[in-house]
Image (spheres, rainbow, N blue to C red):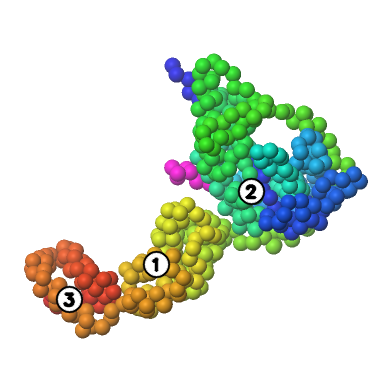
Amino acid sequence: MQRQWESVIGLEVHLQLKTKTKVWCGCDADYDNDLPNTHTCPICLGHPGALPKLNKKVVEYAIKGALALNCQINKESSFDRKNYFYPDTPKNYQITQFDKSYAEKGFLEFKLKNGKGKKVGITKMQIEEDAGKSIHTAHESLINFNRASIPLIEIISDPDMRSSEEAYEYLNTLKSIVKYTGISDVSMELGSLRCDANISVMEKGSTKFGTRVEVKNLNSFKAVARAIDYEIGRQISALENNEEVYQETRLWNEELQITNVMRSKEEAMDYRYFPEPDLLKLVITDGEIETIKITMPETKVHRTERFLNDYGIPEYDAGILCEDIELSNYFEEVSKYSSNPKAGANWILGDVFRILKEKDISIEKFPMSPETLGKIIKLIDNGTISSKIAKDLFEKKLVDDREPEVIVREDGMIQVTDRGAIEDIINEVLKNNIKMVEDYKAADDGRKPRVLKGLIGQVMKISKGKANPNLVTEIIEEKLK
Ligand SMILES: [Zn+2]
């Protein structure tokens, strides 16, 4: 009988916190567009005698993240040194939380494509510091320490996931929830979210996990999913050929869509962890946790409920819009300008989504401001343009700098509401479609609307979509009586 396999996946996610200053010093943490090595000081460069001091804002942000991920906050935790040499680590060690982390035992819940719910445990969350960045050119290697000691939280999941889909949804859910807290950009593209995957394979039904391989260099959630699928396949085929799966760290090769060995996996003891002597224990009081709870921003669940109650949009729409805080902000802005939330939701879930997908961009990069989309909706609602013309206006506005009202006026898109003008077109259509008219008269009530729709279509075509559809329907129905 063929052996059956089961994969076991755990994820380690690093999030950069969006505090103003670094974790142990006063250096400005917003280094993105600045020259290399301009956001540094003796502390983050590891000069002799320089002492770290924990940034209070980092603790506040870290607690917000832990609460959002349903973690228990530990009243007392401590910092440790993880010792290793790497050129971008000026102290030759990283300050992290090894022995006792500030938060643990959380969980994330999400739904899979088949509708089934999934709950993944979070083992622990720890506060630590980022490393600098090495840049390798053809002839030299450069180091930029601007990123050194940027605050991070590491979120370690339990090995609860069994497929790449579960890992993918775990990451999407984590991103969506944490983004609502405002503590991080949570963007893999910007480097503020990084993820390593631990993958092993065991015989189905076994309770003993197989040998774990860690995969790094994952640059998108899709890459995480593909690397997991690749690794599962590679490990199964090794086991079926009676080969050994080695405990090692592998790198995802995006170009070849495979993983390659980077190094044999080190054990925790190789890092000679020991308590950080320059930092006090981290003490978090109930009072502090309560204060932070009060200042937590609106969660996804609350916003979804508010959208249902305040805007009266369908539950399904509210759910999709609130999946991404930026998308839900966009919707709220559109509604502010259009005063028609239902239309706003329809436009976003229809035409806006289509373009985001076509261009493979997120709503932040969408080329139309919510104000403009709101104005287009208003032009339909006040009868200036037909909804059919609105589609053309929408497409035009994506590449046209003129205000929507100006395009409508200058490009002759204004809706025809003149009864006489519409009647002229209708008379012509009825005269040229005698068969359809007879068909309509002979049709039963069930079929009548369909024939009518055909005639209305003809009128709209001749008017180039500009005739007011309500008026067209009204006049045709009158004439056919
Ligand atoms: Zn510094």
Residue 159 in the figure: left or right of residue 27: left
Magenta stretch, main secondary structure, is loop
Q: Tell me if I can see residue 44 in this picture.
A: yes
Secondary structure category for the residue under label 3: helix
Give, as a three-letter code, the residue at label 3. Answer: Ile
Residue at the spot 81% in from the left edge and 38% down from the top edge: 92
Residue 133 in percent (x, y) is at: 71, 44
The residue singled out by tag 1 in the image is 396
Instruction: Identify the amino acid type marked 2.
Output: Gly
Q: Which residue is mark 3?
A: 426
Disc 1 + disc 3, Cβ < 8 Å: no
Q: Earlier in the sequence, mark 3 or mark 2?
A: 2
Q: Nearer the viewer, mark 1 or mark 3?
A: 1
Quadrant assignment, res 161? top right
Residue at left 17%, top 76%? 426
Instruction: Check whether the beta carbons of the residues at disc 2 and disc 1 lie within 8 A of each other.
Output: no
Q: Nearer the viewer, residue 22 or 295?
A: 22
Quarter of the figure with residue 196: top right
The quarter in which the N terminus is drawn is top left
Query: How far apart in space, not on screen, are marks 2 and 1 (Cα)?
Result: 34 Å
The residue under label 2 is 191
Query: Badge 1, how many Cα within 10 Å: few under 14, some, many 20+?
Result: some
Report if the beta carbon of the residue with label 1 is closer than 8 angstroms to ligand 1: no
From where the camera sits, is residue 103 visible? no
Q: The residue tagged with tag 2: helix, strand or loop?
A: loop
Residue stretch in magenta: 109-116
- Dividing the picture into quarters, in which one does residue 28 lie? bottom right
Residue 478: x, y in percent? 17, 78
